Amino acid sequence: MTVARENPSASRGARAWAWFAEEVRHVLPPTIFFIVGFNVVAFSINLVLAQYFIHIAGFVVATVAALVVGKAVLVADKMPFLRRFDTAPMIRPILFKTFVYWAFVFIARLIEAWVHYAMDTGRLFGFAAFTAQEFSWHKFLFIQLWVLVLFLIYTTASELNAAFGDGELFRVLFTRRSSALKLNRRQRIRALVRIGRLAETTPAAELWRPGSGANRELAALVSALGRTETASR
C-alpha cells in the first residue's frame, strides 16, 4: 500500500492563505465602518462649504484614511494589554479600547505623514521642524477628533456584540421581530440572572447531581431560555 505524502509547499500555502483570510476578516469590519463614517463626514463638510465654492477631497481620501485605521486596529488587537478590562463593567473596556485604537491611529497617521515628507524632500530627518512650522495640525486634529467619535461608536457596538454573543447583535437589530424581542427580553434576562444566582449560592456537586432540586431548577431555566430563543426567531 502506498501512503500519500503531504506536500510541504502546499501545506505552507494553505496555512498562509488561512492566515491571510483571517487577517482580512479581522480588518474588514472596522475598514468598512470607517469608509462609511469618513465619507459621511466629508460629505457633510462639503455641504457646509458649498456656499463658499470650496470642495474638500472625498471618497479616495476617506478610503485611504479608513485603510490606515483598519491597519491600526489590526496591530492594536495583537497587543495583550488590550484585553486588560474585558472582565470589568462594559464602560471601562469601551473607553479603554477606544483610547488605545485612537492612539494607534494617531501614531500611524504621524508615521504616514513622515513617509510622505521623506518621499517629497528626500530627507529622513527634519520632520519635527516641518510639523512645527508647516504641518496642518488643525486638519490633523480635526480628523483625529472624528476618529475618536467613530471609534467610540465602533467599540461600543463590538463590545455589545461580544456581550450578546457573536452575531447576536446583528440578529437583534436586523432579523428578529421587535414584538417577539420585547416580549422575551425580560424573560431571558430574568432566567440568566436566576442562573447566575443559582451558580453562586449552590455547590457545584449539588447543581449537577441528577434529581436534585437545584439541578431540576437549572434544567427548567435552560429550557425556558431555549423556548424564548426559538420564539424570537
Image: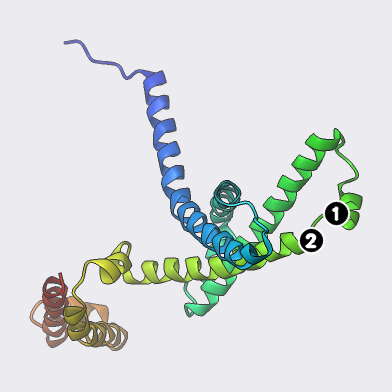
Residue 7, given in percent of the width and then of the height, sits at 35, 18
Q: Between residue 194 and residue 68, name the one nearer to us.
A: 68
On the rendered image, what quadrant is the C terminus found in? bottom left
What residue is pinned by disc 1? 131
Residue at point 85%, 54% (across, down): 131
Q: Inspect the image, locate mark 2, and give the three-letter code of the amino acid beneath it.
A: Trp
On screen, residue 118 above or below 174 = above
Q: Is residue 50 left or right of residue 25?
A: right
Q: Residue furthest left?
A: 211
Q: Position of residue 39 (x, y in %)?
A: 53, 57
Q: Is residue 84 visible to the viewer in this orientation of the structure?
A: no
Above or below, comparing residue 229 to residue 20 in the picture: below
Q: Nearer the viewer, residue 114 or 211?
A: 114
Tell me the distance, in whole angstroms, between the alpha carbons under discs 2 and 1: 8 Å
Q: State whether residue 6 is above or below residue 136.
A: above
Q: Quadrant of residue 162?
A: bottom left
The quadrant holding residue 207 is bottom left
Q: Which label number is shown at residue 137?
A: 2
Answer left or right for 98 relative to 174. right
